[in-house]
Each structure stands twice: as structure tokens, then as C-alpha cells.
Amino acid sequence: MSHLFYQGRGRKPVLEQARGVYMWDREGNRYLDGSSGAMVCNIGHSNENVLTAMRRQMEKSTFGYRLHFETEASERLAAKLAGLMPAGLSKVFFVSGGSEAVESALKLARQHALATGQDSRWKVISRTPSYHGCTLGALAVTDYDPLSRPFAPMMREMPKIPAPRAYLDGLDPDDPETGRHYADMLAAKIEAEGPETVLAFIVEPVGGASTGALVPPAGYMERLREICDHYGILLIMDEVMTGAGRTGAFLGCAHWGARPDIVVMSKGLGAGYVPLGAMIADERLVEPVLDAGGFAHGFTYAGNPLACAAGLAVVEEIESQGLCANAARMGEKLKARLQALMQRHELIGDVRGKGLLLAFEFMADRTTKAPLPRALNAHDRFVRIAYERGLIVYSRRTRDGIEGDHILVCPPLIVNDTHLDEIMEGLDASLAQFTAEIRPELKAG
């Protein structure tokens, strides 16, 4: 019996220990963490340098409320992050997670508008499907039906434009005209809403759980920046999943010429060692807000010294171990091997992603792009099969959260060739078992 209230009735083994890319349950079974938890554990588990930094900070202080004290740990991490951002993004606000980071960005954008006489601007445009967090403010810019629909009456939903799913629409993702086609939907939406009412556009540089590692088509990100500049709206990059090296660069947006006005980070920033997130904003946005009386927002654990000491150690490990470069190198190998796997397993209809943010999507028919019947619950079934074989992967549904099962393969950035071999062996065997299980159901359907 458990007194914990989980998301569902399913139970899992008790975790005993975790080291590097591996985890062990209490019964001694070993699992390869092929999804970095929920795309969190970028530097692997139980990194001794991070643990040492945490112990050292614990001996000094574990809490210092930001209205009472400044802390060395938070100042050092803020300086480190500012140095890794595009020029001008030099102001950092710490939080405890991705949803909090997104909420902070939305509120800063609105308060900047108020502080600069742009009171009519309040709408934040995002994409469909998308996921930006589970709090009501973050859900308002999210469009992922199973998570957002139940709470629709409780929030003010924001305008949406289609995500650039070129592979489903039969368009060439390498053609800049494709990128312009999707990006210009933002301009059309701004005009439809009234440019004077639009505050910001929020986007993941590479899609996360809602679109399964969707890489934008050529020219898309650059065109988004042009549109935001033309209409005077802010570009918020949701780097909660893509940041901290996951795509092969410290920020996912670094792969394209689309400078953000605000960046939000979490997941790989704390890397599973502590709850930690950050909003990093252009100084030109922050100064008017402070001059107008201050940022009317905050959380109790914002800038917690223990969390920031851990976060600084995580970023230092990413740098010292060359993990951005390793993510790019290993990601290229893993993607090629997933594409080869697609040739052997006809249920895989698409492979996509960048760095070590990769996914494959199941399809009943590659030609028509028809998804597997939703009643098969394919994404959950495959994850269970792989888990029983000692491989942890992550899944969601690409098409509005209702159908289009995809599997995210996103191991820690420390993976080597031996780990890739294990991942591929686990996926291959799991796919064979999965196909055998559902084939009779497909024929019956």
C-alpha cells in the first residue's frame, strides 16, 4: 500500500540506486535510462562533482530568502548563464521548474508592456499542438488536448497557430518556402487578433513531448524573428527541454538565427539533482519593470543556494566534459541507427530530432501517414515492453495528444557507443515483440 497519490493506478518498482546512464530497482534489475527520465538527467546520474558541490553548499547554507540575502551560489550561476546566452540576455530569475519558468516569462512580458505604455498587449500566441507546462498560465499557451481540455473553463486560452509538421502535410522541410509558409501563419494570426493586442510568441526550438522532437523546416525560426520584430512582439524561447546541451548546443535556438527576447530553462539545468529552472531576459525588458516598482512575481525557493550550487556544477560538467559536442556526435549516430531501424520495422513511419532529442512515430501506413488506431494505446504499450526489457523510453501522442503515437529516445549526454548498442538492441527486440502483439489486433480492426 502506498500513501502517495500518483497520476494513475499503475505501480513501478522501487528505485534503489542510479549511476551514469543506469538505474537499479530494489530487486537488482538494471535499466538503461534511454530518456534521461523526462529528458532531465543530461549529465547522467550521481555525478560526483555535482554531489561534492552540493555537500559543500549544504555545509554553508541550504536556504537564504531572496528578500533577506543575496547568495554567492545564485550570483555565480546567474553570471554563468548570462555568459552562455545571446548578447543582451543578461538578467536571470530563478525558479524551481519549467512551468514556473514559463509563468515567469509570461508575467515579465506583460509587466514590461505595462511599464512601457503598451497596456493593450496581453495575448501570447503559441502553437498547436504544444506543451509549455501544467500550471493554469502555462496551460493557457499549451495545446495538448488530454492535459489542457479539462481545465479550459478555468483559464483564458491564448491564440494558436499550427506547428510546422511538414512531414504530415507532405511539404519539403528543407525548402525555405516551407519554413516561410508555416511562419507566416504567425503574421496572419497577429493581424487577425489585432497587432496592438499581441504581447509575445512562445515556441520550443525543437518540439518536445507534444510533437515528438519536431525540427523546424528551413527558414522557419529566422522568419519568426522577422515577424516578431515587424510587429514589436516578444519572442520567448521555451528551452525547458532543448536547453543545457540536449540538441548539441547549449541552447536549441543557437542552431538558427533567431535571437530570443526571453529564454526559459529547467530540466537539464538542474539535471535531476535539484528542482531548478530559470528565466533569462533581455536587460531592456527588465529595467523598465524594476523602474516601475519591481517584478510583481516570485516563488519561495527562487534562487535557493543549494539548487543554484548544484546547477552551477551541472553547467560546469556540461562544459568540461564537452557534452554539447558529444550530444551532437552521438545524436547523429543514434538518429542514423533509428533510421536503419525504420527500414526493418514497418510500423515506424517517421524518425526525427536533433542532437539527443530524438523520436520515432508509429504509423499504420507510411504512404498515407495514417496513425495506428488510438484504441491500441500503442505508445504506452511499447514503453511497457521496453521497460520490461530494461530500457526506459518516453512516449506521447503527436496529433493533439489524441493519436499519432511517438517514442522519444533521449539518453543522457554522456552516452557512448556501447550505450548506443544497448539502446538499439533494446529497441529492436521491443519493436519485434510489440509488432507481434498488435498485428492480430490490426488485422481484426
Image: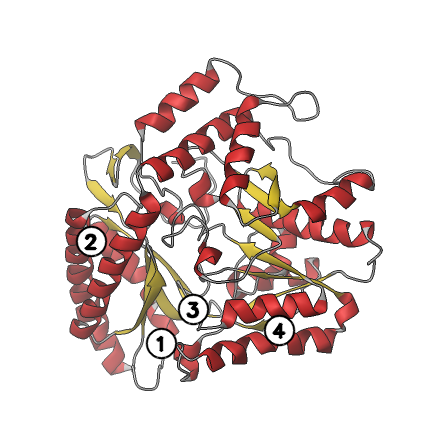
Q: Residue at x 72, y 78 (%)?
A: 192
Foreground residue among 48 and 260? 260
Of residue 286 and residue 342, the one placed in the foreground of this image is 286
Identify the residue shown where x is 51% and y is 30%: 308
The tag earlier along the polypeptide, 3 or 2, is 3
Tag 4 or tag 2, which sits nearer the N-term?
4
For residue 225, what is the image quadrant? bottom right
Question: How far, Cα to Cα, is label 3 from label 2?
Answer: 22 Å
The colouring scheme, among rainbow, by chain, secondary structure or one colour, is secondary structure
User: Badges 2 and 4: C-beta atoms under 8 Å apart?
Assistant: no
Viewer-side label of 3, 2:
2
Q: Residues within 10 Å of mark 1 (few under 14, many from 20)?
A: some
Q: Secondary structure at mark 4?
A: helix
Q: Does any portion of residue 208 appear in the rendered image?
A: yes
Dot 3 or dot 4: first in sequence order is 4
Which residue is located at x 17 percent, y 70 percent? 436
Q: Which x, y percent locates residue 298?
A: 68, 37
What is the distance, in whole Å, between disc 1 and disc 4 at their CAs?
A: 32 Å
Is residue 285 depicted above or below 313 in this figure? Answer: below
Which residue is nearer to you in this view: 258 or 269?
A: 258
Residue on which the image places disc 4: 186
Measure the C-alpha gap from mark 2 to mark 4.
39 Å
Disc 4 crowd, CA 10 A, few/some/many (<14, 14-19, 20+):
many
Mark seen at residue 423: 2
Amino acid bearing label 2: Ile
Dot 1: what SS? loop
Report the amino acid beneath label 1: Pro
Q: Which residue is mark 1?
A: 373
